[in-house]
Image (spheres, helix red, strand yellow):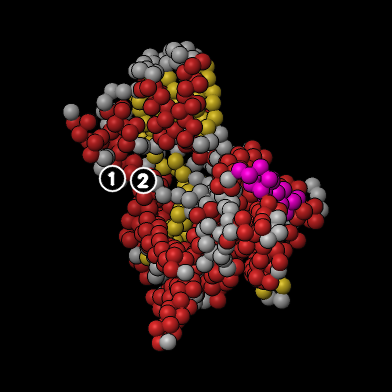
Amino acid sequence: MTKLAKIFISTILIIFLGSWVSAETIGPGGESATPSSEIVVGNDLVASIQAGNYTAALLWHDQSDFVNAVTAGARDEFTRLGIEVVAVTSAGFDAAKQRNDIETSLARNPSIILSLPLDPVTSAAAFEEAKDAGVALTFLSNLPSGYKHPDDYAAIVTDDLFEMGKQAADALAASMDNSGTVGWIYHDAAYYVTNQRDNAFKTTIENDYPDITIVAEQGISDPARAEEIANAMLLKNPDIGGIYVTWAGPAEGVLAVLRANGNDTTKIVTLDLSEPIALDMVRGGNVVAIIADEAYELGRAMAASAALDLMGEVVPPFIVAPAITVNADNILEGWNQSLNIDPPSSVVSAAQN
Amino acid sequence: MEGSYLFSKRLNLQKNLIYFGFLGIFLFFAITLYNDGFLTTRNLTNIVLQTAPATIMAIGLVFVLSSGEIDLSFGSIVAVSALTTALVLQSAPLIMGIMAGLGAGLAIGFFNGILVAYLRLPSFLVTLATMGLFAGIARSMTNLRSIPVLNDTFTGIFGSGKLFSIPSLVIWTILAVLIGHIVYRHTRFGAHILAVGDNARAAQVSGISVARVRLYALTLCGGLAGLAGMLYAGRLQAAKYTLGESDLMTVIAAVIVGGTALYGGKGSIIGALFGSLMMGMLNNGLILMGLDVSDQMIVRGVIILLAVALSLRNFNRI
């Protein structure tokens, strides 16, 4: 084989493998993913963005540590670029309020809107006015139905959702020595983010861990019902080795049930950081790992992609920020890497003891 | 004489608290947000459009509270009606969709009314239960999916359309307030509502069917919540189980601030309109001020607390 042929085949393999890895998390419209690290506003553009006197509105779906970290990432990037944030809202998961927030913020004529559309159907009409006004729209995780890139929006930025589910499966499997039984508590709603993460966990367990069996599957839509669900699951499967819980809120309920039953053998893995969950993990309790996203990086990438769009640069349609497996050993760095803040003092002192 | 004059002047001030409060908040935002788009026609129109469903729910609640009862389920009725309309419109003509949505609201209101008026169950507990019941039904109706509304005539009439350049949501608000006010102030039914709410036993003795009045009040509240659900569906061009879920506290606050007594016998439809507009204006102005979400909630909470405290103080004095 000639040297040229070797280089050619190597290049093809790299491209193929690269696309295979990033294609695991796919966009709502089947778009392949671009790592957020590639979305950077170069110094050559900063001066012209600063001269544009641009403004931005951050119209979030809810309030949480996650949203605060995304906001911080976006604000810092906007500050670097000289873009003023003129409105910040929270819709409290209410589609009608989200529409109101969009209309209200438009009175300030923002050049950019960063938002998480609550669901594709209701947000299609809600963002219509902003779209028609030529606002650079960058969406977090969800896309309004019928919106086309690049005419209607700059980009969708989200977590590497498949990787989050996969890392959850890997962490739980490792804690169970790759064998045993698990329960799968998934989000029972048509919601792109949690659906992809939950299914990635299940797919990974089924494909990569032949000695692990999913013996119980239960959907959850109201986190307050986590305890009932966990109770029923443990009643039917008292020897269950591990439980995957779709996010930290309901995982707190599952943990409470395990504690109440004196069960210190069943392992828990969940997604998104939470103080009670992290505290249990650091103290060597049931929780073995929390899979987190880089929320601050999500915000930075959203701000950068919107600014690039304003400058007429080509922005990839679907951008993903990396996932992190946080365990007792890396809790301090992991928390900061995810949320850009130090862990709660209770977690810090437990980790140091 | 002078004391009595001053007292009556003060009474007028307290009676009209909502209007002074509304004006004060409007002037505050008009001055502080003068350059930030608050006074633009588009923004002021938005406030009315955004509050239209809450205003219509508030009118229903004025009738129920005035009769001495309460309805906590209207938020769930909104979701059920919106989803019913959206589902029916997928395969049936416009009129069927409207009748289904309105019918669902009236039927749930009637169901509440039967339990309260004829089975003598406390309305607080009945509607607390039906709030959960119909929230669950709304979730299961479409398996948590949102249903698009693609009927342009419907979205025009109930959402984005205009008649003589007036947005349809503004027309619905005006119609509901006018009709509500006339029924409340100038009909026998309105008088019976107030009489029952003021003193049910006295009303019964004077020949008023207390049970029937309560049944009608709760049915009307359900019907208006159904209409609010259709306005949401028209405005969003879609229906979702979460619609109306977060309106309960806003609407109750709007009604109380607007001069309706929590324990019956007194109320105001026009006051409820201004209460609802005040809530919408607060949301709007605090966002335009660029406050963080937590700060918006704190300021809104303090203002509502002040307004409710002053309104209730008003009742205590009278």
Callout 2, which amino acid?
A: Asp
Callout 1, which amino acid?
A: Ile
Q: Which residues are magenta?
A: B100-121
At x 41% / y 49%, what residue is drawn?
A: A63
Q: Is residue A160 above or below residue B205?
A: above
**Which x, y percent locates residue A184?**
50, 24
Q: List the residue tagged with mark 1.
A: A341
In the shown orientation, is residue B182 left or right of residue A348? right
Chain letter for the residue marked with disc 2 in the picture:
A
Q: Which residue appears farthest toward the front when viewing the image?
A: B205
Q: Quadrant of residue A10?
A: top left
Q: Is residue B107 magenta?
A: yes
Q: Which residue appears farthest toward the left when viewing the image?
A: A353
Tell me the SS state at disc 2. Answer: helix
Quadrant including the N terminus of chain B: bottom left
Q: Is residue A87 visible?
A: no
Q: Is residue B28 above or below residue B194?
A: below
The alpha-carbon separation of the residues under discs 2 and 1 comes to: 9 Å
Q: Mark 2 and 1 residues: CB-CB less than 8 Å, in contact?
A: yes
